């Protein structure tokens, strides 16, 4: 903040070790990990060198090889030039790609011709992910993705650093960000130095760090005291108190909550709509060929051949869907730590996500018709700040039993504000009408919503709003009151005739878009009023500490 | 049945100048097209004149809709949130808590500036929040922006 610089000498036991305070470049190997281009060139050179030996006997090819060999010099020169250019450009880009930890934010600047400067404010930190694409994983490197709340493309990607460094920096950033938030709440000095100082001293010496009144200092010390039971088992705060030179802030202790077995994941993909569709098309085609005479089969074949080109993109899309499901759910594990929810997954690209406490904006539980027999559910979430590859980052549980889905929801929202949360959510998942205290959709809506109206419903608990919908594919939305962005009410002409309206909760960008459709107008109006009130109360009492104590990490 | 009526504050309707602001571009386009069609009709067949006649009717209908829309567009500043309502056929109400406002934008094109009105757009962290107030008198727009910003800062809650 506006604190004068004198806090510099007081830095004493420096906690900020991995996150540099000066402009720093990334690992020099980065440009080589960035793209496949270089590798492609290398492989083509190798192939070319090998080629003449195995093309031996075939004269045509020999001729061709001969023709090419005449220009081998040119080829080699071309390769060298391309290689040099790629490496040179990569080197230049690497030289101009720097980051540092400022007083309130992480700064990142890059670009040779077109300069780009970004900063991620620590108090707006939404998630820190360690991502390892295939190539980086082979060589033990990783990129660090820092997501913050606010505008488009506000995240920072630091590509690449050693895996250990990336993880250490993630832990450090999360610790400091939590400290900054706490300091802001208690009105203490929230600059990085002051927070690091406070973390190092465990909040016991608020003389200079906890600037301001003594009362503030006392408040700041309180959460630290709460963590005392963990001090023996390496609590973050104690570890960060290590003197300079101790290399890392270890990760907050993690407790595994659930895993997704590979068998279930595969079966869940087999039981997904697109897969069944593909199989049924193939079967129908086969049956048609068998049943009909050969001529007709040929007709089918030509038709199929003609439509192959139109089918191909659709087929690729389907493959993409399977791939996304498989790769995103492969080795999926969710854990709980003091710095938030930890998610690990990925086949070729491993991703370790950390969503800090209470940063999940909304959750959706869904069950397709084919999963109903096993009672499997999929849980997706909205996390503010994630802009690209939403599907990869927004899955909290790719496929799980009802119990696991409830657990996943509990991770997001440990205190539902209901005496029997499991029962309530279960009713939300498979109830109809007014069951479980839900306000059902209006009966007057059945005219234009004959299928679903009985299954729609909305209910507010003390801490969250639940919206249920869907007859074949069931869906439940859960939005914590304090995460509500804004509320909307809409009504079309037909709805006005029938006296019903749609109620919408606006959440941040993501797969979860909660809408309670076709409510009785009276109900919708009452809900709009009461929900605005509840959101206001929710905003007033939200704290990360609350989340920690609710999930049992802290008392 | 009545539509949403907040009990604390009264609705502030947008300026009627929004009607000409919307009608002028509409009619300029329509008149140009109609003129072209009339000339075309004179050159070829009188039947073509049916098209401008239909366009005229469409224009009148759109005019009526615009008048209805503008007279239904209002906002209300309550203690903790701003309420914006709009539309008659497709009605909508949006409630934006001050604590959730990321920033407030005021914009005015040349025509709007000539008429002395501006558009106030509220941004939250949600792309779904459709809270814009078109046709706020210029002076009021600046005041509204300052008021909203200061309230937003006072109540800003972490995401």
Image: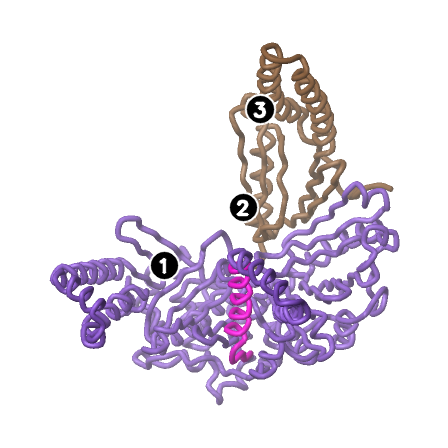
Chain colours: A purple, B brown
Left or right: A223 in relation to A527: left
Residue at the image point whose x is 53% and y is 34% from the top? B107
- Is residue A204 shown left or right of residue A428? left
Q: Are marks 2 and 3 on the same chain?
A: yes
**Residue A76: within the magenta?**
no
Confirm whether residue A32 shows in the render.
yes
Q: Tell me the chief SS of the magenta region.
A: helix
Quadrant in the rendering for residue A415:
bottom right
Element under disc 2: strand
Q: How far, Cα to Cα, is label 2 from label 1? A: 22 Å
Q: Is residue A223 left or right of residue A483?
A: left
Which stretch appears magenta? A311-334
Q: Residues within 10 Å of mark 2 (few under 14, many from 20)?
A: some
Q: Residue at x 70, y 78 (%)?
A: A402
Where is residue A202 drawn, in percent x and y? 46, 77
Circle 2 sits on which residue?
B103
Residue named by callout 1: A107
Chain under label 1? A
Name the residue tied to disc 3: B116
Depth check, front residue: A43 or A198? A43
């Amino acid at each position: 903040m506006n604190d004068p610089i004198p806090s510099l000498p007081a830095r004493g036991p420096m906690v900020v070790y991995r996150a540099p305070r000066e402009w720093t470049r990334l690992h020099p190997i980065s440009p080589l990990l960035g793209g496949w281009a270089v590798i492609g060139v290398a492989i083509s050179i190798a192939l070319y060198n090998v080629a003449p030996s195995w093309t031996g006997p075939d004269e045509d090819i020999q001729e061709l090889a001969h023709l090419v060999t005449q220009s081998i010099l040119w080829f080699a020169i071309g390769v060298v030039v391309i290689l040099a250019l790629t490496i040179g450009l990569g080197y230049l880009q690497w030289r101009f790609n720097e980051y540092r930890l400022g007083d309130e934010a992480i700064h990142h600047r890059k670009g040779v011709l077109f300069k780009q400067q970004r900063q991620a404010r620590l108090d707006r930190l939404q998630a820190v992910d360690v991502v390892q694409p295939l190539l980086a994983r082979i060589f033990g490197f990783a990129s660090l993705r820092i997501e913050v709340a606010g505008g488009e493309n506000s995240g920072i990607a630091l590509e690449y650093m050693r895996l250990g460094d990336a993880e250490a920096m993630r832990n450090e950033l999360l610790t400091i960000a939590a400290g900054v938030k706490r300091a802001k709440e208690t009105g203490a000095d929230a600059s990085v130095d002051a927070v690091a100082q406070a973390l190092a001293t465990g909040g016991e010496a608020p003389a200079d760090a906890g600037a301001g009144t003594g009362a503030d200092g006392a408040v700041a010390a309180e959460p630290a005291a709460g963590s005392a039971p963990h001090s023996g088992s390496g609590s973050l705060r104690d570890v960060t108190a290590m003197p300079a030179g101790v290399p890392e802030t270890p990760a907050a202790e993690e407790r595994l909550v659930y895993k997704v077995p590979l068998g279930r994941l595969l079966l869940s993909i087999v039981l997904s709509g697109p897969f069944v569709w593909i199989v049924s098309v193939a079967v129908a085609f086969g049956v048609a060929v068998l049943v009909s005479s050969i001529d007709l089969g040929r007709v089918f074949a030509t038709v199929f051949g003609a439509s192959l080109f139109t089918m191909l993109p659709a087929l690729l899309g389907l493959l993409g869907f399977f791939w996304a499901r498989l790769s995103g759910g492969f080795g999926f594990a969710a854990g709980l730590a003091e710095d938030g929810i930890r998610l690990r997954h990925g086949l070729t690209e491993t991703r370790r996500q950390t969503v800090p406490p209470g940063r999940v904006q909304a959750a959706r539980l869904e069950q397709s018709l084919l999963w109903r027999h096993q009672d499997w559910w999929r849980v997706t979430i909205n996390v503010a700040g994630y802009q690209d590859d939403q599907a990869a980052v927004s899955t909290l549980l790719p496929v799980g039993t009802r119990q696991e889905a409830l657990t996943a929801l509990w991770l997001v929202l440990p205190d539902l504000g209901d005496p029997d949360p499991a029962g309530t959510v279960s009713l939300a998942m498979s109830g109809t009408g007014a069951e479980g205290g839900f306000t059902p959709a209006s009966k007057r809506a059945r005219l234009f919503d004959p299928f679903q109206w009985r299954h729609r419903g909305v209910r507010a608990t003390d801490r969250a709003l639940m919206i249920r919908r869907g007859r074949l594919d069931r869906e439940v939305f859960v939005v914590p009151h304090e995460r509500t962005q804004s509320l909307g009410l809409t009504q079309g002409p037909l709805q006005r005739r029938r006296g019903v309206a749609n109620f919408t909760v606006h959440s941040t960008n993501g797969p979860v878009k909660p809408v309670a459709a076709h409510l009785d107008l009276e109900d919708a109006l009452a809900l709009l009023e009461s929900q605005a009130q509840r959101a206001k109360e929710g905003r007033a009492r939200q704290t990360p500490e609350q989340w920690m104590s609710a999930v049992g990490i802290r008392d | 049945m009545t539509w949403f009526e907040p009990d604390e504050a009264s609705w502030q309707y947008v300026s009627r100048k929004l009607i000409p602001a919307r009608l002028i571009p509409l009619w300029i386009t329509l008149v140009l097209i109609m003129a072209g069609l009339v000339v075309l009709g004179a050159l070829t067949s009188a039947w073509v004149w049916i098209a401008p006649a239909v366009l005229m009717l469409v224009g009148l209908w759109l005019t009526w809709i615009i008048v209805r829309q503008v007279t239904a567009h209002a906002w209300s500043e309550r203690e903790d949130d701003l309420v914006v309502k709009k539309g008659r056929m497709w009605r909508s109400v949006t409630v934006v808590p001050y604590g959730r406002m990321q920033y407030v934008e005021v914009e005015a094109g040349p025509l709007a500036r000539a008429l002395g009105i501006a558009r106030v757009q509220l941004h939250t962290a949600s792309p779904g929040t459709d809270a814009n107030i078109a046709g706020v008198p210029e002076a009021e727009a600046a005041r509204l922006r300052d008021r909203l910003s200061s309230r937003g800062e006072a109540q800003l809650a972490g995401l």
